[in-house]
Image (cartoon, rainbow, N blue to C red):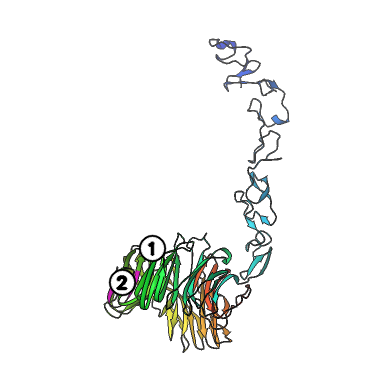
Amino acid sequence: MTRRHHCPGLVAALLLVTSGCDPGYECGELEYDRDEGRCVCPDGLVLRDGGTCAPPDQSDAAVPDGGTPCVPGAELCNGSDDDCDDRTDEGEIDCGELPAGALTTMCRAARCEVASCEPDLRDCDGELDNGCEVDLRESVAHCGACDQACDVDETCRASSCVALPLGEWFVQAGSTGAEFIGDLARHPDVENDSTALVGTLGASGSFGTIAMTGSAGQPSAFVGVAGTGGAPRWADTIRASRGANARLVTIDGAGNVYVVGDYDGTLEFAGTTLTTSMRRGFLASYSGLGARRWIHEIRGTSPSDIAVAATGDVVLAGTFVTSATIGTRTFTSSGSAGYVALVQANDLIRTVLVIAPTSGGASVARVVTTTDSIFALGSVGGPITFGTSTFAAAPGTVLARVGNDGAAGALVPLGVPNPTGLALGGDTMIVTGEFSGSLTVAGRTIEATSFGSAYVASFGTDGTGRWVVLAATASNRASAGSPVIDDEGNVTFAVGGSGSTITVLGQDFAAERNRLTLLASVTRDGAPRWIESLVDSDAVAAASAEARGRDVVVAFHANSLGVAGLDQPTLGYSDVYLVSLRGR
């Protein structure tokens, strides 16, 4: 039984217990509950602000006699009755600052949510923090409404799913003479839209809207950089007294552009004059804004590929015989050999690694980089010891792993002939090339035509074969350009062929002028996805392509452009095109 005692007035510290109150308590008009050790209102009354007792009303219905009273406050979105009106989360509740794209918020199920969005925006994931994160006008996953996805061959335009146009934008580099494609490169930062294009200019011409001055009667090397939407940013020509060409390009993390080409005669660049009586190579550097920085002469070799290592060093790879020189660094071998050279951004030659068997020769065709390694794709024609790998007989086509410091790692035999392209994505390596006869990878065999065919093969980074597909055959000859891997593992590659008919991934295409260039895509397992014709005339397979997300940028030279979704430009003779293609 609860024992209560009425204790009027101040209770002295030494008041006897028999008086009905414990010492040290002043309860006034309240009663002291000895069992609970506190002052309470008499039965039938509740405690109000100010310490007075009064009859209960509706707000006290849930408060038991003598319990803690409900103290009214601002109603919050928390599932509680904060304002003591027997209702929860009602009325105008402050959910804080409006997130991006939101007009109003609301409380539902004890959490704040977006109630309404700006026109054409929606909160499709139900998360308050990112607000109205979807634009219904262009979201492929939420086209016109949340969770209303377009098909794989569609895109979202004005809130409706429509057939996907392949072309997104293009830049044309041309003149009254003949132009030839060299290479393209994209900035390594996915947030940076810079794309560099190099090639050969037949006369004075333009890169998009930027004029380029060529050499009178001689070809000139050119470099142009485009930004968002293909808008030209800057362009330059490298001219020599007896002609110059640009063949390779890459961009480092600071935006500096590096160009590999060749020249004959006298060439002036960034205060340096190079002179030769026979054609030699060069490695030239520009700042991200197009300012000339430095140039090195290359003798005895024509680099086959260029990249940027995770350290920021420029990586050159290629083949030489007996002796070659890059800048002031000369390297030698007893015969034909491959090499991987590292050049610092400030133009110092860091190191050169030579890949040379004891006999039979070696070569390097392509190079790619990862965060901790450099991978060189090439061929070894004799016994070799390389890092941790030793082969008593010729291993053939190999992938050489090199450290970022230029140290030899290991060789991985691949068992495919004549490689022309290499791409790495995660634990997957894609190799393109040409072959004759038959080719078997991972138990799958493909057959070439009598004139040679192109293949695409997939390997693990340990060299384990996964699959191979017959990329293209032609009534004359077929070739495959460098592959690219998108962020879903799909593989896109360009194929070209000469002859009246070209077969790509099992589909026949007629070539009206006996040449045709197409872009094809397969899944990460090698299953065909789609094929698109790029040009139908004198053309080459895309010299280079790079992926960003699911989009692909490709470069080629041609007499005509046949990309769906792009306005046809005013054509010169064999112009160079830098084209952005929407992903699928």
Element assignment for label 1: loop
**What residue type is disc 2 on?**
Val
Asked which quadrant contains residue 583, the reply is bottom right
Q: Does the magenta stretch include residue 369?
A: no
The stretch in magenta equals: 330-340
List x then y, in percent, for residue 491: 51, 71
The residue drawn where x is 63% and y is 28% is 68
Apparent side of residue 428 relative to residue 355 in the rendered image (left or right): right
Which tag is nearer the camera, tag 2 or tag 1?
1
SS assignment for the magenta stretch, majority: strand
Q: Which of 27 and 113 is in front in this view?
A: 113
List x then y, in percent, for residue 173: 54, 73
Q: Is residue 333 magenta?
A: yes
Apparent side of residue 123 relative to residue 488 in the rendered image (left or right): right
Sequence-wise first label, 2 or 1: 1
Dot 2, crowdedness within 10 Å: few (<14), some or many (≥20)? Answer: many
**From the image, which quarter does the N terminus lie in?**
top right
The vertical placement of 32 against 508, above or below, is above
Dot 1, crowdedness within 10 Å: few (<14), some or many (≥20)? Answer: many
Residue 354: mark in rendering: 2
Q: Which of 8 and 293 is in front in this view?
A: 293
Q: How far apart are marks 2 and 1 (CA)?
A: 17 Å
Check disc 1 and report the residue beneath it: 313
Can residue 292 be seen at all in this image of the molecule?
yes
Residue 512: mark in rendering: none
Element assignment for label 2: strand
List x then y, in percent, for residue 192: 52, 60
The vertical placement of 292 against 245, above or below, is above
**What residue type is disc 1 on?**
Asp
